[in-house]
Amino acid sequence: MPKPALVIHGGAWAIEHTTVDDHKKGLQNALEVGWKILNSGGPALDAIEKTINSMEDSGVFDAGKGCVLNEKGEVEMDAMVMTGDLLAGAVAALQEFPNPISVARRVMEKTQHMLLVGKGAAIFAEKQGFERMHIMDLVSHREFRSWKDNKEMPFGTVGAVALDKQGGLAQGTSTGGTRGKMVGRVGDSPLIGAGGYCDSDTGGASTTGHGESFMKILACKTACDYLRTEKSAQLAAEKTIKLMEIRTSGKGGIILLGKDGDIGIAFNTARMARGFAREGDLQVFV
């Protein structure tokens, strides 16, 4: 029987020193939520959804209740989920709903489609019973000030990859966008192969950082493919970040979980919020 494992991230780039403790606490809480599900024999998909819900609800990370504002002062969220049998669901440019990862899961389970965007994603979310939330409850006062001051932001996408006791794999990625981005811009987070990927033949991955760079090399699919030849998930993760750096000069990080539970984490930014949990071991780093 496989040993369960959970690996998560909560953003890369130059995470402010004053928020490090909050990031660590947010990571710790999220890992505990997901690990409880996995350790009790629950499915990987439930674990990644609830883990990411915890980060979306914390207000610490750039996701859910910690969103940032686009050039027009609006919120546009993206998210995706994927399982090892190649089922997937995603939403992009979603507004007013604080848990886009859950909406993405519902797209996977309740439709024949894989990606819903903008108005269509919102209509679907409402029909599925998700409650709308005012922008003031999705964006902090600090973010409003930073947006008005045109302050550069760190990349704060959240993500998780899990392996359950039955050998099931699942991956999820959720983001509140990039501060000041053009209206309608969609990054890597909801795009299969770029911001996330999961295949029971290899493993699962999720990225955080400069979305366009990850999109150019299909970073998560690339990382999972490297698992076929590299000796460890760590080497596969490092090789993926190196490829992105060489080909695009991009910055960011990736978490990778092999089908056997081997964990890989790599980044080329000043900081990356990340953590993992497996039998007898739960650790977070920023």
Image (cartoon, rainbow, N blue to C red):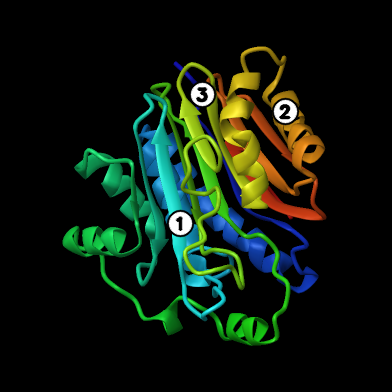
Question: Mark 2 sits on what residue?
Answer: 234
Of callouts 3 and 1, which one flags the residue occurring earlier in the amino acid sequence? 3
- Decide: is 56 above or below 168: below
Quarter of the figure with residue 118: bottom left
Sequence-first tag of 3 and 2 = 3
Q: Choose top left, top right, bottom left or bottom right for residue 225.
A: top right
Percent of width and height locating residue 209? 67, 52
The kind of residue tagged 1 is Asp
Label 1 Cα neighbours within 10 Å, binned few <14 / some 14-19 / many ≥20 = many
Q: Nearer the viewer, residue 135 or 43?
A: 135
Distance CA(mark 3)–CA(mark 2): 18 Å
Badge nearest the viewer, 3 or 1: 1
Q: Mark 3 and mark 1: span between their CA atoms?
A: 31 Å
Where, quadrant-wise, is the N terminus in this rendering? top left
User: Which callout, 3 or 2, points to the residue nearer the camera?
Assistant: 2
176 relative to 80 in the view: left or right? right
Residue type at mark 2?
Gln
Q: Which residue is mark 3?
A: 3
Location of residue 191 in the rendering, given as x and y in whole percent from the top left corner: 48, 43
* Residue lying at 51% horizontally and 78% vertically, measured from the top left: 139
Q: Residues within 10 Å of mark 3 (few under 14, many from 20)?
A: some
Residue 117 horizontal/vertical position (percent): 35, 56
Mark 2 surroundings within 10 Å by alpha-carbon count, few (fewer than 14), some (14 through 19), many (20 or more): many
Give the residue displayed 55% in from the left and 68% down from the top: 182
Mark 2–mark 1 Cα distance, whole angstroms, equals 27 Å
Left or right of residue 75, residue 178 in this image: right
Q: Is residue 23 above or below residue 215?
A: below
The image quarter containing residue 180 is bottom right
Residue displayed at 62% across by 14% down: 228
Q: Position of residue 212 (x, y in %)?
A: 63, 49
Residue 100, relative to residue 22: is it above or below? above
- Which residue was labeled with disc 1? 78
